[in-house]
Image (cartoon, grey):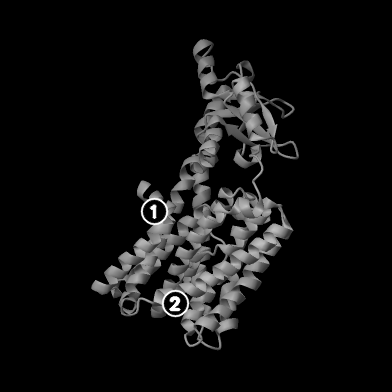
Amino acid sequence: MKILQFLQKNLVFTIPAFMVLGLIYGANIDAVRLKTTILPLTFLMVYPMMVNLNIKKVFSKGDNKVQVTTQLINFILIPFIGYILGRLFFPENPILMLGLLLTSLLPTSGMTISWTGFAKGNMVEAVKMTVIGLILGSAITPLYLQLLLGAKIEIPLAKVFQQIIVVVFLPMLFGYITQQFIIKKYGMAKYQKDIKKIFPPISTLGVLSIVFVAMALKAKSIVADPTVLIKYAIPLAILYIANFAISTLIGKYFFTRANGIALVYGSVLRNLSIALAIAMTVFGSEGSEIALIIAVAYIIQTQSAAWYVKFTNVIFGQAPPDVAGDVMSKGVFTINDDKSIKEAIELFEEEHIHSLVVMDSTNKPIGILNTRNLFDHIINNSTDISQKISNIDLKPILIFNETDPLILIGKEMKDNNVYKVLVKDVKQQLCGVITETTYFKRIVKSK
């Protein structure tokens, strides 16, 4: 798993490396047999990505203005820029026009959320953009291809829809089923803390494998004319520069800093994994040429996103100090004080957690029960696990608002000698927790 995580964290280098490996393989060995790996590798690429997809975010409340603006950029502006660039740079090659158009048609990726977080943008809106963009893009792409290129190249519309169902919506369904099974079996806390992070590196392996196959299949023509990669890179670079420029201007002058950053990453970063999957499964032998354009786009996208985050503060201004809502772990596990110790132990085991917020009869939090003070109580007082939780000395509780500065919270945790505090939302409902570990991670991440 460490190797996969390394590959994922260093896409700037690993994608070019796998392109070179594919080139070497295809130049020396007949790569035709690799075609049989395309469908399983596509599933390996897409399915793990779908396990962590939070579909419910589509229905959550948020800033409709930034969502609508982002999707207008994604589905009105950028596809037509991609189409025009294709007409300018590849007027005699509709397959390459299709590759450029496919790159510009499918917005957002998992990196949309990651880079928004790195730049201290609005993560909630970024997640929502990712889900909406994926669903809309998958549904609209076949129609756009037919509308813009149907006169130049035969678009197997039925096959495109069929493959989108196979490579997008079926993995989405299986991913959701997997996610719910894991949560039911291991609990939400275990899923969020330990299991969720397993899937993105597996998806990355699928991406790198598909890139390898695409390069291997086109290796002989690339070796014959290496300048083809530069020919592909130029219009792609223009597409990304234009996209960054337009989204930055709109985000900076019409939205808050946090929403503006989310808009940029929600409209510039494309879902190249899905584009790659469609190219390799729908367009047969020509798919590898389309996939080559998408592989070059991967390099430009990862490089540009990494550089853009370095200039975020220059463009949008300094980020405000961290507040509770930025760092808290969402969700609070509670138990009423009239429940038994046995029920508390069962809940600890079921959810794979170490502490519970204890509520009184009015549903007001009165303290924290953790495995340590429960153990002390049993050892020092009684092994009768049928007795009520109200008989146990609970740990003190501190509650903060989502907007309270993190530095203030850290000071209060130290002064009161507590390792865990609760966070409430604008409706005064408990919505998350902050622990010493959370605090440490944020400090490390900011350095």
Q: Distance between the residues labelled 2 and 1?
A: 27 Å
Q: What residue is shown with label 1?
A: 7
What is the crowding at mark 1: few (fewer than 14 residues within 10 Å), some, or many (at least 20)? some
Q: What residue is shown with label 2?
A: 231
The image quarter in which residue 149 lies: bottom right
At which x and y percent is residue 271?
A: 52, 64
Looking at the image, the residue that sits furthest to the left is 28
At which x and y percent is residue 268?
A: 58, 63
Horizontal arrangement in the rendering, residue 227 relative to residue 176 (left or right): left
What is the crowding at mark 2: few (fewer than 14 residues within 10 Å), some, or many (at least 20)? few
At which x and y percent is residue 424?
A: 70, 36
Q: Which residue is drawn at 75% across and 39% down?
A: 427
Q: Which residue is drawn at 32% across and 71% down?
A: 216
> Looking at this view, is 338 or 208 the one in front?
208
The amino acid at mark 1 is Leu
Q: Are marks 2 and 1 in contact (CB under 8 Å)?
A: no
Horizontal arrangement in the rendering, residue 136 relative to residue 210 (left or right): right
Residue 167 in sight here: yes
Looking at the image, the residue that sits furthest to the top is 380
